[in-house]
Structures are given as structure tokens and as C-alpha cells.
Amino acid sequence: MYINEVAKLTNLSAKAIRFYEQKGLIAPPDRSVNGYRQYNMQHIEALNLIREAREIGFSLPECEQLLALYRNPHRRSADVKAQTLAKIDDIDAQIAKLQQMRTKLSALAAQCPGDDSENCPIINSLSGQCCCHNA
């Protein structure tokens, strides 16, 4: 299969497919006589895994680990589950951080009258200025 066919089957761009090949996430495909890449079903399955894993938050190095498990006929589902649970922990930490950021932003917005005055409690707070300081 040529790259454009693989792109349609995997919902990835040809550029993304070449990128994953360059990064070593998929094996270099065989080349036809005229030099075109010839992909097989293993490439498509690996690319689908990468696409799906990326969509749920796995990084490229994590995708590489998942691909190693995918390619290992002696893999243990416990290893895959452990990596998935670790990703959930990462996401929970990101959510907590985002909630802290939201709380701080809400507090800043509540301090600001949002009127036409030059004095802005948000800018003052972010810059470390006292709220009564005028430049």
C-alpha cells in the first residue's frame, strides 16, 4: 500500500506517517522499484495504535513503549494495564494543576472591577505590585 492509501485508512496525514517512521515508531517500509514506500498491515496496525494512543494523551515515548508491548508476543496484559494506570495518574495530576490554575484565575478575575481605570488588580498581582501602587 502506498502512503496516501495508508493515510486514508489510519486517518493520519502522510507527513505524520513519515514523521513516525523518522522517529523509529514504525519500521521503514519496503520500497517499490520506483522508490515509493510500500506499507503493510503491521504498519497500519502500529499507526492506528499510535493515533489512538495520542488521542487519549500518550506521549511519543509512551507510544514507543506501547508499540514495544504490541510487538512483543510474550507481553503481559499486566504491563499494558500498568502503563495505562500510570497515564491515568499523570492525567489526574494535570487535572489537579489545571484546577489550581483555574482557582487562581477566578480569584484574580474577582479582584478586578473590569472598568476603564488604569489600575488593574490582575496586572498588579501578576507583577508583584501592591494594588495601591501607581506608576
Image (tube, rainbow, N blue to C red):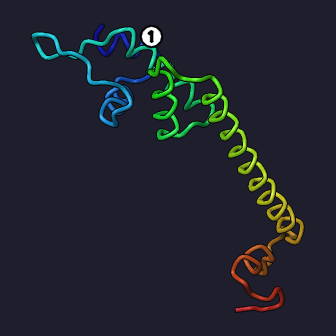
Q: Foreground residue, 82 or 10?
A: 82
Q: Is residue 11 visible?
A: no
Dot 1 falls on a residue whose secondary structure is helix
What residue sits right under mark 1 in the picture? Answer: 9
Whether 15 is drawn above or below 88: the answer is above
Q: Give residue 116's quadrant in the image.
A: bottom right
Q: Position of residue 73 (x, y in %)?
A: 47, 17
Classed neighbour count for the residue bearing mark 1: other residues with Cα under 10 Å, few (<14), some (14–19), many (≥20):
few
- Quadrant where the N terminus sits is top left
Side of 9 where 119 appears, left or right: right
**In the image, what residue occupies the spot 33% across and 33% down?**
24
**In the image, what residue occupies the spot 33% across and 9% down?**
40
**In the image, what residue occupies the spot 52% across and 30% down?**
66
The residue most toward the front is 74
Q: Foreground residue, 24 or 8?
A: 24
Q: Position of residue 89 (x, y in %)?
A: 72, 44
Q: Is residue 35 visible?
A: yes
Q: Position of residue 106 (x, y in %)?
A: 85, 61
